Amino acid sequence: DAGVIQSPRHEVTEMGQEVTLRCKPISGHNSLFWYRQTMMRGLELLIYFNNNVPIDDSGMPEDRFSAKMPNASFSTLKIQPSEPRDSAVYFCASSLRGGTGNQPQHFGDGTRLSIL
Amino acid sequence: GQQLNQSPQSMFIQEGEDVSMNCTSSSIFNTWLWYKQDPGEGPVLLIALYKAGELTSNGRLTAQFGITRKDSFLNISASIPSDVGIYFCAGLNNNDMRFGAGTRLTVKP
């Protein structure tokens, strides 16, 4: 079975440019999460969706960050305009939200973003 | 952000040795998870624990969900070189998952 698929795997761009990261969750999963990982701060939750609806975006650092989930099989995380401090590895994860809600999240391989 | 205290931060061991790492929290979690992350990849789920006191094994890995629901440990027996990586604990309540800072494991052949 295909896992969580993220693209691109690597992105290098100049500051001020718009960056769009993409994620395809595991088929049948109804919760999707965006994380950012840095050496200093570890894994940080940015936003998550249940059934395509954003539930908690309190981790989104600034208005420059936005995320959408137009359907159950696709999500984007956009940074506009990008800044050097946005450089990090961005992970998408998905899970099946069952009755208890406590289902493990499965991660993609991430997008390594470098803003010059 | 991180609310879990994971220790040790790093370990250097000889192949064949056993490894133990743990995670504590000031908050109660309904589920404890252990992930492993290899360079350039995302975290991969190793073990999920759903009940306080639960002891679960996955091959050479054994993990326990603490009785107080505020801690968990992971043991790796008879380590091998491919065990190298960063191990993360995670506590989960509904969709709110918090991570430890990770334990970086190095195994010397």
Image (cartoon, rainbow, N blue to C red):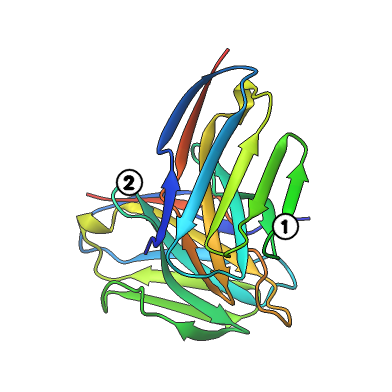
Residue B40 location (% of width, % of height): 49, 40
Q: Is residue A91 above or below residue B28?
A: above
Residue B62 location (% of width, % of height): 70, 42
**Residue that numbered label 2 is attached to:** A39
Q: CA distance from mark 1 to mark 2?
A: 32 Å
Circle 2 marks a residue in which chain? Answer: A
Q: Is residue A66 left or right of residue A9?
A: left
Q: Residues within 10 Å of mark 1 (few under 14, many from 20)?
A: some
User: Measuring 52% from the left and 46% from the top, which residue is drawn there?
Assistant: B22
**Residue that numbered label 1 is attached to:** B54
Q: Is residue A38 left or right of residue A55?
A: left
Is label 2 in a helix, a strand or a loop?
A: loop
Residue A72 location (% of width, % of height): 65, 78
**Quadrant in which the N terminus of chain A is drawn:** bottom right
Q: Nearer the viewer, mark 1 or mark 2?
A: 1
Question: Mark 2 is on which residue type?
Answer: Met
